Image (spheres, grey):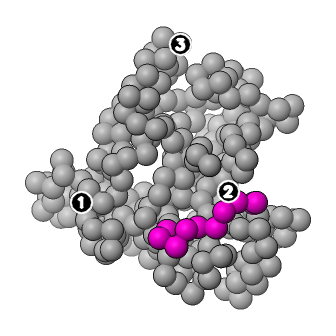
Amino acid sequence: MTTAFHHISLLTKNRHTNLAFYTETLGLRFVKNTVNQDNHRMLHYYYGDYQGTPGTVVTFFVVPHLGNRYDNDHFLATIGLKIPMGSLTYWEKRLKEKGIEVLREETQLHFLDPDQVAITLTEVASDLLPKERQVANEIPGDYQILGLNGTEIHVQEPQKTLTFFKQLLGWQADETGRIVLNETDHLDIIATNTDKKMHMGRGAIDHVAFAVKDETALEALHQKAQRQGWQIEKIVSRGYFKSLYIREPGGNRMEFATLSPGFTIDEPLETLGESFALPPFLADQRAAIEANIYPEE
């Protein structure tokens, strides 16, 4: 099955707490310790399966002294993660043993991360992670998280956002505002009920990224977005993938990212995340970047 999502990126205040939660509690691999390419003072942490496969990746920009977020007129919410069928009870027990309050609903578990990000684990009928993508930790391979499977886009005028996805990507929503992307993945478009401006802060989702096959397909999407008149922010190489950023009509940032070349362009697969990595085009700035990272609290 082709992945619909590429990654989802958020803001965190404390890198140590964030790292512990996503690697030790959820069992993801720390696949990249790098820098925010748009603000070299911010660390950028990536988590995913053993290979950092697109569709499994959750990333965080680290901003010490970060204030509270305010989810008002428009915002993104919820990290939806899929787990193998039959693993829900294992995850419920694991989370409760770690002192995390969990709400169970049929095939789903709902809980919060340390930055008060809503996370939903959903059992799906899907293949288990293949051995080469499983992380070596205490979580059995047949219970490990399979990847992303959903998020929510909150906007004042849902129909405009639905039109964006339909015209640009051909994605149709059902009567509830849910766009079904494939057998396991979906996107929910939800109406907000306030004119108050949103404010990014702890746990805010900066953007959600969808997977695009290659640079040719990305450029075709870029040209189509231009013809249709959408609010394009930029198209840029991130080294690990090439990205197109567009603001959907409600104001939320959407990213479209290529499946390759991946995270091994600047460090070996076996040691991903073990050192501070920079893609080749930033390598000659290493000393200056390392000297100016935001100090911790």
**Quarter where residue 269 is shown:** bottom left
Q: Residue at x 43, y 17 (%)?
A: 223
Q: Residue at x 31, y 74 (%)?
A: 271
Alpha-carbon span between mark 2 and mark 3: 30 Å
Image coords of residue 79 (percent x, y):
64, 56
Alpha-carbon span between mark 1 and mark 2: 29 Å
Nearest to viewer (mark 1 / mark 2): 1
Q: Residue at x 44, y 61 (%)?
A: 52
**Quarter where residue 82 is shown:** bottom right
Badge 1 or badge 2: first in the primary sequence: 2
Badge 2 or badge 3: first in the primary sequence: 2
Helix, strand or loop for disc 1? loop
Question: What type is the residue that disc 1 sits on?
Answer: Asp
Q: Residues within 10 Å of mark 2 (few under 14, many from 20)?
A: many
Badge 3 or badge 1: first in the primary sequence: 3
Above or below: residue 284 compared with residue 16? above
Q: Which mark is residue 80?
A: 2
Q: Quarter of the image containing the C terminus?
A: bottom left
In magenta, the rendered stretch is: 124-134
Q: In this rendering, would 262 be left or right of 9?
A: left
Q: Nearer the viewer, residue 24 or 258?
A: 258
User: How many numbered marks, from 0 up?
Assistant: 3
Above or below: residue 155 compared with residue 117? above
Helix, strand or loop for disc 2? strand
Above or below: residue 291 compared with residue 214? below
Q: Residues within 10 Å of mark 1 (few under 14, many from 20)?
A: some
Residue annotated with mark 3: 228
- Residue 137 inside the magenta-drawn segment: no
Q: Main secondary structure of the magenta part?
A: loop
Residue annotated with mark 1: 266
